[in-house]
Image (spheres, coloured by chain):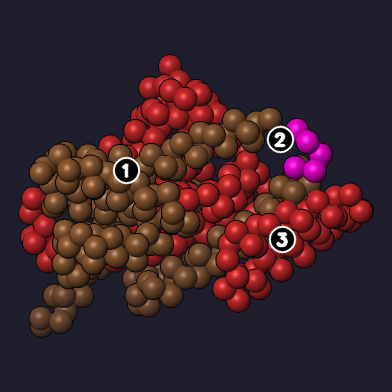
Chain colours: A red, B brown
Amino acid sequence: MIFLELFLTFLKIGAFTFGGGFAMLPFVQEAVLQKGWMTSGEILDFIAVSESTPGPFAINISTFVGTKMGGVLGAACATLGVVVPSFVIILIVAKFYEKFKSSKTVSGVMSGLKPAAIGLILGAVVTVGSAVFFPAGLTFKVFETLSFYVSLVIFAAALIMSFKKVHPIIIICISAVLGIASGYLL
Amino acid sequence: MKKSKLLALFLTFFKIGAFTFGGGYAMIPLISRETVEKYKWISDEDILDIVAIAESTPGPIAINTATFIGYKVCGFWGAFCATMGVVLPSFLIILGISFVLKEFKELQAVQFAFNGIRAGVVALIIKALWTMYKKCPKNICSYIVIAAAFVATAFLNLPILAVIIGCAVFGLVYSILISRRVKK
């Protein structure tokens, strides 16, 4: 049953990802690709939507996947799934947080989890990135296609802008305009 | 009295959820302005503690912070109202967008736009990674874990849950070994 599956999938994701921002991306990617709920390209499209709308990425992506697979009820199940672990764990931790704060075990575990998030997201970028630049798989043929170079130029421009601290929404808009222009002109 | 506090918690976090782009970390300045300066529910030091705990417990920072502050202010129902408040704006907005997106997805122009956007988003994620890397402690433990987690998921296709547990154990063992060596 899709509703239970959505709830349990996002429950697991909520229970085992640490940190904000894109920390959840590798886990979500693994789950939705395996289950065939979304493609790599759709994940990237959705990240653009999430960056351009308010609210945390975690809630945005769970609501989106839930809606896609099971309508309004699906969205409710997926979002509830991602929220419940946080809610329960914080209620427990809040009761003895002085102890938690100074715990050597917690800080030790975190010294492994913080860099793990970086390595995992890097792995996720390779997977979704190869779907953008090598849509037909890793072959030399790609260097003969125009769309490869268009993507490369847009990627480079976006990277420079983001390091110049241009707001993500503006970068997404510019990428969209470049995509439309190159689509109609070339 | 208590009911009005619950309502205030809900509305405050609803506002925070509705007006911050970019998720948990982007919310912290607004959270501290509303809960510390405006309502005086918690103190400045509390905020730092709460963020530190939100980072070291599983789940999104935004949810963890809202639940924690809600609980401190008004117990279980406080936690419930604050969390509902921070989740609802995202939920409603994305629900609306999902239906709109479905209608427009087939348009040629929209497909061209997303072709461009996909390349741009890869760049955005790389920038976010760079920011995370700068904040991460630079020691041998971090470098080993980053490399191992990357290879394990990108090339070996190991399940992410296994990688996370492995990295947590490695970090714990490493920090125990380091603290023993310092004692000697």
Q: Which of A17 and A169 is in front in this view?
A: A169
Q: Which of the 4 quarters of the picture holds residue A87?
A: top left
> Residue A157: percent from the left, percent from the top?
71, 68
* Tag in front: 1 or 3: 1
Position above or below: A124 against A174? above
Q: Which of B96 and A178 is in front in this view?
A: B96
Q: Disc 1, disc 2: CB below 8 Å?
A: no
Which residue is at 37% across, 72% downward?
B136
> Residue B162: percent from the left, percent from the top?
36, 46
Number of other residues with Cα within 10 Å of mark 1, as a class: few under 14, some 14 to 19, many 20 or more = many
Distance, label 1 to label 2, CA atoms, is: 30 Å
Q: Mark 2 points at which residue?
A: B105
- Protein chain holding label 1: B
Res A174 label:
3
> Residue A171: percent from the left, percent from the top?
65, 62
Q: Mark 1 points at which residue?
A: B85
Q: Which amino acid does label 3 sit on?
A: Ile
- Protein chain holding label 2: B
Badge 1 and badge 2 both on one subunit: yes
Q: In this view, does B169 lie to the left or right of A123?
A: left
Position above or below: B46 against A15? below
